[in-house]
Each structure stands twice: as structure tokens, then as C-alpha cells.
């Protein structure tokens, strides 16, 4: 399951993004909780780029069921730019997104 279990909103505010990589399956599972900021998302991608143990190609499972924030269009564009920047180190294949809010899901599948 997830590497961290968040049992309180205080802990979730300290660690709004958690992820685990299954190198054998070439899969990253990422969970976002609470209000997630652009800076936190960009830092997550920079950490992935620096992780020498991560496979160079990964499928993605993104769990946003506990996310309370809704990104603006410019923030999604900034994340897309960051993904392009790390492409030499990490590439993403299939991506599965789970979200309870239609608006959040709709913004991310475009």
C-alpha cells in the first residue's frame, strides 16, 4: 500500500504528497492529501529526477481522492513543463488518475 498512513490533518499538511516506486513493476503510486501547492508538486518531480534507484520509465497511479485543492490552468502548464524538463531522466507511460471531484479529474485528463 502507501508508504505513509496519514491519520491526522496535521500530518497530511506536513506531507501532502507521498509516493512509492515499485521498480520491478515500473510503477509509481502517488497520493496527494489536502491542499497541495504547485511548489510541492514541482518539488516532487525534482525529487524523482534525483532518485538514481528509480526506473527510467514508469507507469503512474495518481490518487487524488483526498485532495482538497483545485489547480489553475497555469499551474497545470507549469507541471507539464517540469515533466518535460525531467524527461531525460524519467519518462512516464500509462497514467491512471483517481479523483472524487469531477472538476479535478477533468482538469487533469486533458
Image (cartoon, rainbow, N blue to C red):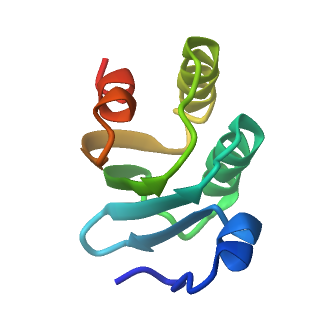
Residue 75 sits above or below residue 59 on the image = above
Q: Residue at x 50, y 52 (%)?
A: 67
Residue 80 sits above or below residue 16 on the image = above
Q: Is residue 76 left or right of residue 91?
A: right
Q: Residue at x 69, y 56 (%)?
A: 47
> Residue 99: x and y, percent?
31, 47
Residue 13 sits above or below residue 86 on the image = below
> Residue 11: x and y, percent?
70, 78
Q: Is residue 37 left or right of residue 87?
A: right
Q: Which residue is nearer to you in this view: 43 or 69?
A: 69
Q: Is residue 49 left or right of residue 53?
A: right
Residue 7 sits above or below residue 54 on the image = below
Q: Residue at x 61, y 64 (%)?
A: 52
> Residue 81: x and y, percent?
60, 20
Which quadrant, please, contains the N terminus?
bottom left
Which quadrant, please, contains the C terminus?
top left
Q: How many marks?
A: 0
Q: Quadrant of residue 25?
A: bottom left
> Residue 16: x and y, percent?
64, 61
Amino acid at each position: 500500500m502507501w508508504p505513509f498512513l496519514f491519520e491526522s490533518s496535521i500530518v497530511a499538511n506536513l506531507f501532502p504528497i507521498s509516493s512509492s516506486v515499485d521498480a520491478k513493476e515500473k510503477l509509481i503510486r502517488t497520493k496527494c492529501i489536502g491542499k497541495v501547492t504547485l511548489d510541492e508538486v514541482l518539488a516532487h518531480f525534482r525529487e524523482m529526477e534525483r532518485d538514481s534507484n528509480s526506473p527510467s520509465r514508469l507507469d503512474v497511479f495518481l490518487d487524488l481522492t483526498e485532495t482538497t485543492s483545485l489547480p489553475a490552468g497555469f499551474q497545470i502548464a507549469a507541471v507539464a513543463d517540469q515533466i518535460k524538463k525531467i524527461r531525460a531522466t524519467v519518462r512516464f507511460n500509462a497514467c491512471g488518475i483517481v479523483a472524487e471531484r469531477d472538476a479535478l479529474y477533468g482538469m487533469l485528463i486533458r
